[in-house]
Each structure stands twice: as structure tokens, then as C-alpha cells.
Amino acid sequence: MSSTTDMARQRAAGRAQIAARTLRTDRWWLPPLLNVAGLGAWVIYATVRAFMQNWYFVPEYNYLTPFYSPCVSNGCVEQAAHFGRFLPDVWFLPYAAISLPFLLLFRLTCYYYRKAYYRAFWGSPPACAVAEPHGKYTGETRFPLILQNLHRYFFYIAALISLLNTYDAVKAFIKEDGSFGLGLGNIILVANVVLLWLYTASCHSCRSIIGGRLNHFSKHPLRYKAWVQVSKLNGKHMQLAWSTLASLAITDAYIMCVSAGWFSDLRIVG
């Protein structure tokens, strides 16, 4: 067999030998660009708010922003510190320093977010059928990306934090004077919690935990039904990922505005 034939077969088995980076003619660069803008804007907003240490609680209606829950710093307002105050009040330590790192790690290791920021910020690859600019690719087999495998454990912690957010939303129905109240803030808090639970339940790790390690679904009908429902949610994981970023920002911004006195809460009852 000639060397020319061997070379042709080797090329056929690998990546297409074309000079252009891609043959796509559509606007393949638009989704990565939108991801950079959206994720970048959210990170900037969340970072500023986490370290602002102000306008996070409305005592009259028990509104606590999820960015400060649980509020465990000595600088927290006493009514907002539902689980005590034991962390030092220093500018570089967020009031919710216990929960925020784990929530960040949960989202950072999320399967969808990996795809989004790998493509948007690292260009690895920037889009399907578009060659990446990196000369070497090791995947998630080396430090630090090998730590992405801890996602399942961050899922457990995120579920516990969602319980805290649920507690905050329920507690907000009891006003400062002990009476029942309902306002626009309550609706926003509940909507945010519902979206957070849907996002958490749609996680790939949740789907694996519910349906994994089963050889026969027929022997586990309840787990099978739960797996089917979680699988349906899993198909909406991307939409829920973005929806929860929006709901978190909206919830925090609304509570900040009411707490700062920029406008009053729209009350429905009480």
C-alpha cells in the first residue's frame, strides 16, 4: 500500500483538513457573545450586592434577599439573623458567607454553565463545528477542572440552601407585628423559590441520583416515575438556569429598593 493512501486514510479518520476555522455561514458567534454579556453582567451585579452589606432586609415585612441568606455576620440586623450571628463583621466577608461559596460552586460546576462559560469565555470550542483556538485539550482530567466532578456534592448543599430560601419566603408572610401580610414582595420571593427548586431538581446530578444504579425500572416504579418527571425538567435545564439568574437579581433588586425607601411595597393584604 502506498504512503499516499495511508496518509489519506489518516486524514479521513481525524478532523477535516480545511484551512478555514469553520464552514458555518450563520451567526455562530452570537450565542457565546450573549453568554459573555449575560453572565458577566450578573456576576458584576451579584458581587457588588454581596459586598454592599446594606439594603438587604425589610423589617416591617420580613423580606430578606436571597443574596444575604442566611445572614450570619455580626453586622446583620438582628431580625434578619434567623440562625444567629457568629461571623466577624469585616468588609471582605459577605454577610451570607456560609451559603454563597457553595451556591457559586454549584452553578460553576453545573453541566449547562460549564458549556456556557467554556464556549463564551474560553472558546473551547466557541460553537459546534468551529475549531477552538487552543492547541492542546485535556478536558476535565487535570487540576483545576477535575474538581468539576464534585458537582454532585454541591447539589446536596444547594438543596439545603433552597430549604433556607423557602423558610425565608414563608417567614415573610408574617409581618413585624406578628400579623399575616401579603404584598408584591411575597409573590416575588415565592416565585423565586419555586424557580430555584425547579432548577435544582432539573440538575443532571438529581436525575442521576433518582434513576442511577437501577438495573430494572420495573422493580422500582416510584423511582421510575420520579425519574421521568426529573428527566422532563432536565430538558429545560438551560432555560431554568437563566430564569433563576433573572429571578435572583429581580428579587434582590426589589428588596433593595424597598429597603432603601426608593418605593413602597405594593400591599395586597396588611
Image: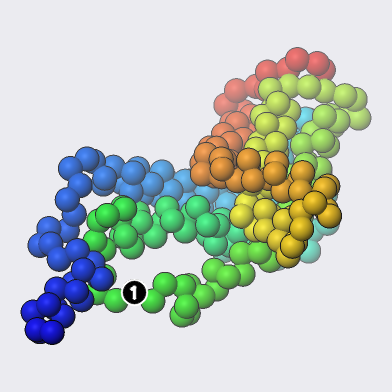
Crowding at mark 1 (Cα within 10 Å: few <14, some 14-19, many 20+): few
Q: Position of residue 93 (x, y in %)?
A: 61, 63
Can you say whether 27 is above or below 188 in the image? below
Q: Residue furthest top?
A: 268
User: How does the figure colour the protein chain or chains?
Assistant: rainbow
Picture residue at 87% right of the left edge, 24% below the top: 180
Q: Is residue 20 left or right of residue 84?
A: left
- Residue lying farthest to the right in this orientation: 178
Where in the figure is residue 183, as x and y percent of width and height?
A: 73, 22
User: Could one spot residue 270 in this view of the protein?
Assistant: yes
Check disc 1 and report its element: helix, strand or loop.
loop
Amino acid type indicated by mark 1: Tyr
- Which residue lies at the image location 26% right of the left edge and 46% below the top edge? 29
* Point 83% across, 53% down: residue: 220
Q: Is residue 46 left or right of residue 65?
A: left
Which quadrant of the rendered structure holds the N terminus?
bottom left
Write down the quadrant of residue 131 in the picture: bottom left
Q: Can residue 66 be seen from the camera position used here?
A: no
Q: Residue at x 55, y 57 (%)?
A: 110
Left or right of 73: which side holds 175? right
Q: Position of residue 99 (x, y in %)?
A: 68, 58
Residue 52 drawn above or below residue 172:
below
- The number of discs equals 1
Foreground: 170 or 235?
A: 235
In front of the other: 69 or 107: 107
Q: Which residue is mark 1?
A: 137
Rendered location of residue 91, percent (x, y): 58, 61
Locate residue 210: give its quadrant: bottom right
- 145 or 69, which lies in front? 145
The answer to whether 104 is drawn above or below residue 48 in the figure is: below
State which quarter of the image contains the C terminus.
Answer: top right
